[in-house]
Image (cartoon, rainbow, N blue to C red):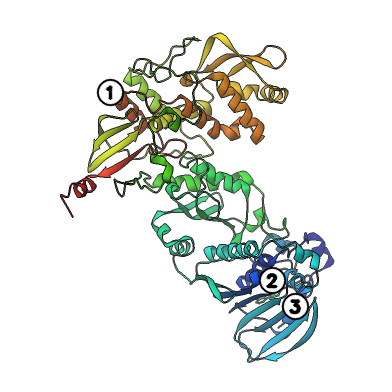
Amino acid sequence: MAIIKLLSEEIINKIAAGEVIERPASVVKELIENSLDAGAGSIRVEIKNSGQDLIKVTDDGQGMDEEDARNSILPHATSKLASVEDLYSLQTLGFRGEALASIAAVSQLAIITKPKGKLEGFNLVAEGGSMVSCGIIAADQGTTVEVRNLFYNTPARKKFLKTEAVELRHIIEVLTHYALFNNHIAFKLIHDNHQLINSPALIDMRDNIASIYGIGLAKDLLEVNYKDEGVIVSGYVAKPSRARNDKSQQALFVNGRWVKNNDINKAVYEAFHSLLMVGKHPIFVLSITINPQKIDVNVHPQKLEIKFEQTEKVFSAAFNSVRESLQRNNLIPIVDEIYPQFNIGLGKNIFKYNFERSTQTIFPSENNLSPTEDSLTWAGVNPLLLGEEINSHNNDSDVFKDAAAVIQSNNHHLSSKEFSPIFFPSMKILGQIHKTFFAAETEGGVFFLDQHAVHERILYEKFMNQFMNSEVKIQSLLQGEIINFTPAEKILVLEHKTELSRLGFNLEEFGDSTFVIKTVPLIFGRLQHSQTIQEVVSTLLEKQNSIEMLKEEIITRMACRAAVMAGEELTVSRFETLVQELSLTRLPYTCPHGRPSLFKITSEELEKKFKRRG
Ligand code: ADP
Ligand code: MG
């Protein structure tokens, strides 16, 4: 029975027709989507010359009868959409009836297909969109679409193609994504007779991801499983220690459709934030399931983008789902080997400390506050500061009150859920090493802690908490500091005056583009204020965003600047207080940049080193 119908003019006009086929990878994508829509259990893609000479996709799906096969290459012919309403309840990947027609128009196309139950198959050959021959043929159930000499009749478009390697990369990207999501379907990619991808049908999603992104990843994948107000988020994220320098291992699917969506990506990054090193990108494979009526899939020619009715809701579901999964898992790194290499999988640079200030600070400090123990106060005292009393950090109960408050009201970001503090091991601080690290005895081994990272984490969470509750404690400057801006910056400063004051910086206009700094945040007393404000302003200028959006970045920098540096001497008792505060933070195991704040060497490891065990 024929199931393909020509779309009415009304529907055609509704559909944002566009350049569906811009490169070989677009052909591969459309053909794979058709195979998936046809219920295939196995999809084999063979290409020659990065798809420019040949793209052949074979599936074992439902196939087409003769009439459908003939209709399939006509423009706007589809079996997937009958009315305008259907567009809003789509269960299929295709819906425009455009792909085969567009591909046929710019190539030499052949279709061999046989539906279930039929004895013989049907074969059709077209050139430049017109059928040149057809007939009965022996075939297996399913469909093979063969596309030869893509763009042979549109030399201009052919010229636009990038190098073979680039085109091949795009094809691999398409295959990889569909193989990632459809673990129960087998995928193969063969390029110039070499098998590039062989992804068998697997029951388990984790195995499937590992088979594609690398077997070693399996043990570092954290499951994401979240449901909130009609949005389901499932899939996996890799531990932060697996983060990459590129974004190549990130995949997002909405209702089974591979999509690119910056808002959701941002939510995922935000959930990871402060667990990731600067410039690192998390690995994730996430699938969002949402009522099809709440999304518009028809906004992009390649159907790669979608619009959500309630972006905020989806955004916060994505954030919460990933955050929850990271919290659920203990992220403390354990050392595999002691010497010669510290290998905790977080990148090479982490342990390259030279015991100099500069290696630990992102922003070199000009004004070296003398690092004696007495001058090192938590908030730091600047002689110019006046006003509210500095927290006395010899007073432990105050410290704990502060820290407990951080935990209690730490529902910042988008999260509506309270996160309970995660388990923090007890330890006995033994002493400082090279004025940079501390060693501590703990059950089953030894901890090494990084004093800068520890303090940074505490300051970050304390300040973020104050900021989110709009109760940043401020100090007035006895002598207002003068700060100059460029005209563009001045406009920005005036525009963000309220937000800056929320950060604790109150500025008063002093003529031209000069301002006086009246107050600064109490907790960051050690900062050089004009430099910090300058930085905040240039971040605003560069990113063209609000402080609210950039708060993580800004506060991370401030915490980094204000934290004790490597090279500063600290007593055991002072560090004990720091560790107590650390234990009350939400994410004690890393600094806000994502570097580890502590790691463990197990007693077993020590025993091995001393040849007490084999
Ligand atoms: P769409 O997928 O948007 O419907 P296409 O031009 O991609 O439009 O395909 C047109 C029609 O051809 C589909 O609706 C489907 O009925 C049929 N078709 C295409 N590829 C296959 C396939 N691999 N197996 C079965 N039917 C197919
Ligand atoms: Mg299609």
Q: Residue at x 84, y 66 (%)?
A: 9
Q: Which residue lies furthest to the top in this view?
A: 478
Dots 1, 2 in contact, CB < 8 A: no
The answer to which of 136 and 12 lies nearer the viewer is: 136
Does dot 2 land on a helix, a strand or a loop?
loop
Residue 437 in sight in this render: yes
Give the percent coordinates (x, y) of residue 534: 60, 24
Disc 3 designates what residue? 108
Task: Single out the mark in the foreground, 1 or 2.
Answer: 2
Q: For the residues marked 3 and 1, what is the alpha-carbon distance in whole angstroms?
A: 78 Å
Task: Single out the mark in the foreground, 3 or 1.
Answer: 3
Amino acid type of the residue tagged 3 in the rendering: Gln
Q: For the residues marked 2 and 3, what is the alpha-carbon distance in whole angstroms?
A: 11 Å
Disc 2 designates what residue? 52
**Of callouts 1 and 2, the N-terminal one:** 2
Disc 1 designates what residue? 573
**Of callouts 3 and 1, the N-terminal one:** 3
Q: Residue at x 70, y 64 (%)?
A: 23
For residue 299, above or below residue 148: above
Q: Ligand 1 lies in which image quarter?
A: bottom right
Does dot 3 land on a helix, a strand or a loop?
strand
The answer to which of 464 and 310 lies nearer the viewer is: 464
Amino acid type of the residue tagged 2 in the rendering: Gln
Give the percent coordinates (x, y) of residue 399: 36, 22
Give the percent coordinates (x, y) of residue 71: 76, 78
Amino acid type of the residue tagged 1 in the rendering: Ser
Dots 3, 1 in contact, CB < 8 A: no
Q: Which residue is drawn at 74% across and 83% down?
A: 125
Residue 38 in sight in this render: no
The reply, left or right, for residue 335 in relation to residue 18 is: left
